[in-house]
Image (cartoon, rainbow, N blue to C red):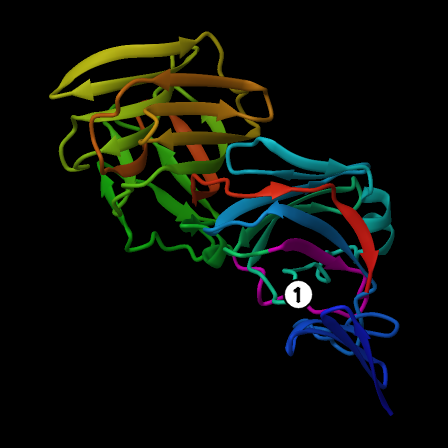
Amino acid sequence: MVEAIKIGNKTLVMDGKILSLFRRGSLLRQMYYGGYEDFDGANGGVWKKYINIPIKTVPLEYAQYLIEIDDTNVSVYNVEGTLKAQSSIASEFWSLVRSDGFDIRVFDHLFNQLWFWVEMFDYTNKKAKIWVRLPENSEELNIAFGNEKAYESSYDDPNQVFEFFDDFEDGVLSSEYVTFGEGGKEANGVLTLKDTDSSFDAVFLNRLLDYNHVVYARVYARDLEAFQNRILQQDPSVNKNFYRAYFDAGETRINKNVNGTWSSLVSLAWQPSLNTWFIERIVVDITGGEIRFEFPEYGKSLSLTETLNWTSGYFGFGVYQADIDIDYWFIEKLADPVTFDTPKILEF
């Protein structure tokens, strides 16, 4: 038996256990008694609840956002690490989500599934980081959970979320890189750069980065002496005309090389701890004339504001008398077109 109820300019259609909401003939939502079952990998189960993050300013362009969930809060951040929305609703998430996180799904206001990547999921300590590629014209950002039968989602794909992504899991350095000196070695899920002969060894992404962007990397350092992140390098085959964010002699620095001449710009008498993983984030705002070298776990940052002379460039990792591993790194578009409302938990 099919029943229809008119509610203003919307129509609610009840067909068996399916509820469908239409507006002017267009399907807005489809809900199921007892849960939702139409996401990929349902495996005969249903999703019981979802984190609903309403959008107050509808984006006119796509952007990437990070949702962090700890034992108390659900928090939304932009690519620069600015808090956009937060609510103390996490306990309900952890009470229903699978211990492996395989039931996580991300979707918009029309129940279209969105690309996402689970950077970290620690069920025991109740910590999760979920990156989302939010399309233009999205009116909601939602995260489903609570399907104990679900398979891992095919939408959990960082290559679809970011502008570039590499986790070095295939054991072969991508053809998108060019190397200098001894380059780097990809093995056991990491890229290792280790200078053994006092030469400059580097790996460059062979792709022009001529847009405002953020570089995000997870790094492990056994020795940080002259570990470099080279940015806005006009031509990686020529060792000049570039900015670099790097570590040297117990300091963290940003400086530049113009036609072979070095200029020291900003520095901080601090370095990340050795023999531990840390996150580094480099914000490159070509339009605004700013480079920021940031360490969110330590609350440390360097900022350089000046006219960036080059409108196109490459990015690369390099070492001189250093020994580091890179677990993964990715590039995000520097964009924040969304204003979010307070997150809440809803039932399907």
Identify whether 48 is placed above or below 193.
Answer: below
Identify whether 125 is placed above or below 221.
Answer: below
Identify whether 339 is placed above or below 281.
Answer: below
**Please, what secondary structure does the residue beneath circle 1 have?**
loop
Q: Residue 154 magenta-drawn? A: yes
Q: Is residue 118 left or right of residue 344?
A: left
Q: Which residue is mark 1?
A: 152
In the rendering, at what x and y percent does residue 55 appear? Answer: 64, 48
In the rendering, at what x and y percent does residue 57 appear? Answer: 58, 45
Q: Is residue 222 left or right of residue 42?
A: left
Instruction: Please rate how many residues cluster around mark 1, counting C-alpha atoms within 10 Å: few if below 14, some from 14 to 19, many from 20.
Output: some
Nearer to us in this view, 1 or 294? 1
Visible residue check, residue 254: yes
Identify whether 118 is placed above or below 259.
Answer: below
Q: Is residue 209 left or right of residue 41?
A: left
In the rendering, at what x and y percent does residue 60 appear? Answer: 47, 51
In the rendering, at what x and y percent does residue 336 appear? Answer: 50, 40
Which portion, as a residue range, is magenta?
139-157
What residue lies at 34% left-to-right and 52% top-to-bottom? 173
Q: Quadrant of the C terminus?
A: bottom right
Nearer to us in this view, 55 or 261? 55
What residue lies at 48% left-to-right and 26% top-to-bottom? 222
Q: Is residue 62 left or right of residue 55?
A: left
- Type of amino acid at the residue the image marks with label 1: Glu
